[in-house]
Image (cartoon, coloured by chain):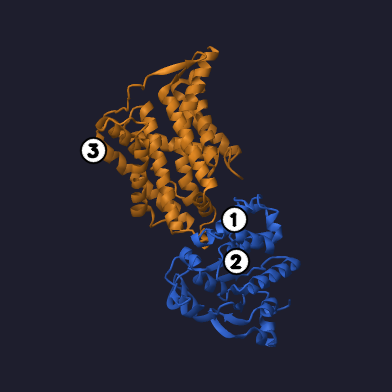
Chain colours: A blue, B orange
């Protein structure tokens, strides 16, 4: 479904990604794992069209997307929940969700989408008129994920959804990610919470210094002492 | 000093203030969404005023009825200016964008009056339909048809803009872009096109304001700067990004100027500046802005 082939990405003159290739199949959940600054966010931002690759190709359902604008890529069915969440703080929760369904195709199914988002995050439904800037960190994450789902994506890309959240909230978020996965949406999950990510993902890519160092079944890495030690640290 | 006299000043203050508000709204919209400070905003007002003048003198078109035409023409002019001049800087980071766009807008501020000088000469012009001097009295207070019409148009335009931004999908996309353009892109919003439409909308509103201004005072190629400064004062007074706020701040400035004119005569311009300084010292986010 998503095929990233040998991409190089630069920030100005500085190369951030070298020859990165990865693949997400229909309905699959894939985890991207690696240390801070390894290039995980760069990868997902390139997939979403926020950054441009200098070499290589990205295809989505066999259509080249690496030269397309971000908003076109969203319309094609890839939604990114960025690391900083990117909610619109001055707008209400409802308006934030509404904007998630901005692409014409998503707009047609807006009402159904609301219901399924409320089903996943009931707390959002009770805060619809509140301005998004007043939400807590966990609620912001829920809003950002819910908003991305409003677009009815075929591929959901989550960049560090658990970052900075309390353990109990993290557990909740992961439960929802699992539920989204069960509804047959493909997911590309960037996580520092390695153990949790490997538990729900089917496959994983290990990112090191802007390169894919290893990839394979998530289960394999879950029992790989080296991986757990390197990325789990003292936690 | 009679009460009627003060009330009369109050009424004319509201009339002028509505125009201040209308000019400020255009500037505030463009700055709020794009972080581009269009110091040539007044030049677009001037061009709008002359467009109304041409419609009136060459085509015998009523200036009020011609407003939509001027709005459309200026919208197109805004699109051209954006595409040719501003679109290149729109993709830079905020600071670079602000500086570069200031230079471009300053260039326009120098060029447009020259073009106007060539097209319309430096002679003072006026848009003066048959009813321009007429008025009616309410409780002893004279209300002119033209200022009243201008006030109504200003209210309608601002209300329309407010509804557009708050009630329509497209308007929400504009607000989203102003809050976080990167996230807006991830919603599937075409940010580049949103910028172009917003800029052009700001120019169109300036053009409409120009015609209304041209109905109440003389047109000159160099009239723009005065209005840019007024619009800047009102935007800072109101706080960035608040559309109704900009309108009310405009009314406040207009009223304060008009009433203070009773005692201060031609020095009222200073009053606006003093108010601005006080606001900047004690409430830097503006009267209606969020801290």
Q: CA distance from mark 1 to mark 3?
A: 49 Å
How would you rate the neighbour count of disc 1 (Cα within 10 Å): few for under 14, some for 14-19, many for 20 or more? many
Residue drawn 53% across the image and 74% down it: A43
Q: Between tags 1 and 3, which lies in front?
A: 1
Q: Is residue B178 above or below residue A112?
A: above
| Label 2 element class | loop
Q: Using residue B60 as the reference point, say whether residue B19 is left or right of it.
A: right
* Residue toward you, B196 or A128: A128
Residue located beneath label 3 in the image: B118
Q: Using residue B218 as the reference point, say whether residue B166 is left or right of it.
A: right
**Percent x, y for residue B212?**
39, 31
Quarter of the image with the C terminus of chain B in it:
top right
Q: Using residue B197 as the reference point, say whether residue B183 is left or right of it.
A: right
**Percent x, y for residue A214?**
58, 86
Q: Is residue B272 above or below residue A40?
A: above
Chain letter belonging to callout 1: A
**Percent x, y for residue A6?**
47, 81
How many numbered circles does the render carry? 3
Residue located beneath label 1 in the image: A96
Residue located beneath label 2 in the image: A83
Looking at the image, tell me whether mark 1 or mark 2 is earlier in sequence order: 2
Residue drawn 51% across the image and 30% down it: B251
Which of the labelled discs sits on residue A34, or is there none? none
Residue drawn 45% across the image and 42% down it: B27
Q: Is residue A167 above or below residue B111?
A: below
């Amino acid at each position: 479904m998503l095929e990233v082939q040998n991409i190089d990405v630069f920030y100005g003159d500085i190369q951030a990604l070298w020859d990165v290739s990865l693949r997400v199949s229909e309905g699959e959940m894939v985890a991207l794992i690696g240390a801070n600054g390894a290039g995980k966010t760069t990868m997902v931002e390139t997939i979403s069209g926020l950054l441009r690759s200098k070499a290589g190709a990205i295809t989505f359902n066999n259509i080249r997307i690496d030269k397309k604008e971000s908003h076109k890529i969203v319309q094609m069915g890839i939604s990114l929940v960025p690391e900083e969440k990117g909610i619109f703080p001055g707008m209400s929760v409802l308006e934030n969700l509404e904007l998630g369904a901005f692409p014409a195709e998503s707009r047609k199914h807006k009402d159904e989408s609301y219901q399924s988002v409320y089903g996943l995050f009931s707390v959002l439904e009770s805060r619809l008129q509140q301005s998004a800037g007043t939400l807590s960190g966990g609620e912001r994450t829920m809003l950002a994920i819910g908003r991305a789902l409003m677009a009815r994506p075929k591929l959901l890309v989550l960049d560090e959804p658990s970052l900075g959240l309390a353990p109990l909230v993290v557990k909740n978020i992961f439960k929802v990610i699992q539920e989204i996965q069960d509804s047959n949406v493909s997911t590309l999950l960037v996580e520092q919470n390695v153990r949790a990510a490997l538990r729900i993902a089917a496959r994983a890519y290990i990112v090191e210094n802007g390169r894919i160092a290893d990839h394979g079944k998530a289960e394999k890495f879950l029992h790989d002492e080296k991986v757990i030690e390197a990325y789990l640290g003292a936690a | 000093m009679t009460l009627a006299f003060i009330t009369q000043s109050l009424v004319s203050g509201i009339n002028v203030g509505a125009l201040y508000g209308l000019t400020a709204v255009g500037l505030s919209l463009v700055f709020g969404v794009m972080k581009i400070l269009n110091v040539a905003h007044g030049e677009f007002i001037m061009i709008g005023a002359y467009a109304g003048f041409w419609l009136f003198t060459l085509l015998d078109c009523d200036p009020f009825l011609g407003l939509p035409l001027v709005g459309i023409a200026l919208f197109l002019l805004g699109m051209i200016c954006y595409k040719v001049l501003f679109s290149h800087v729109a993709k830079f980071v905020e600071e670079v964008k602000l500086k570069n766009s200031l230079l471009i807008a300053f260039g326009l501020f120098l060029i447009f009056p020259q073009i106007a000088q060539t097209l319309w000469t430096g002679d003072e012009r006026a848009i003066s339909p048959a009813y321009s001097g007429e008025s009616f009295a309410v409780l002893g207070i004279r209300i002119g048809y033209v200022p009243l019409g201008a006030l109504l148009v200003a209210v309608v335009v601002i209300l329309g803009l407010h509804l557009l931004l708050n009630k329509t999908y497209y308007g929400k996309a504009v607000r989203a872009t102003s809050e976080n353009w990167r996230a807006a892109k991830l919603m599937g919003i075409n940010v580049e096109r949103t910028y172009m439409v917003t800029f052009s909308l700001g120019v169109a509103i300036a053009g409409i304001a120009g015609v209304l201004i041209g109905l109440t005072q003389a047109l000159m190629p160099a009239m723009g700067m005065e209005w840019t400064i007024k619009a800047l004062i009102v935007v800072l007074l109101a706080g960035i990004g608040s559309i109704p706020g900009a309108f009310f701040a405009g009314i406040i400035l207009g009223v304060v100027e008009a009433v203070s004119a009773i005692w201060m005569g031609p020095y009222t311009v200073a009053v606006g500046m003093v108010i601005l300084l006080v606001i900047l010292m004690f409430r830097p986010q503006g009267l209606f802005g969020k801290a």
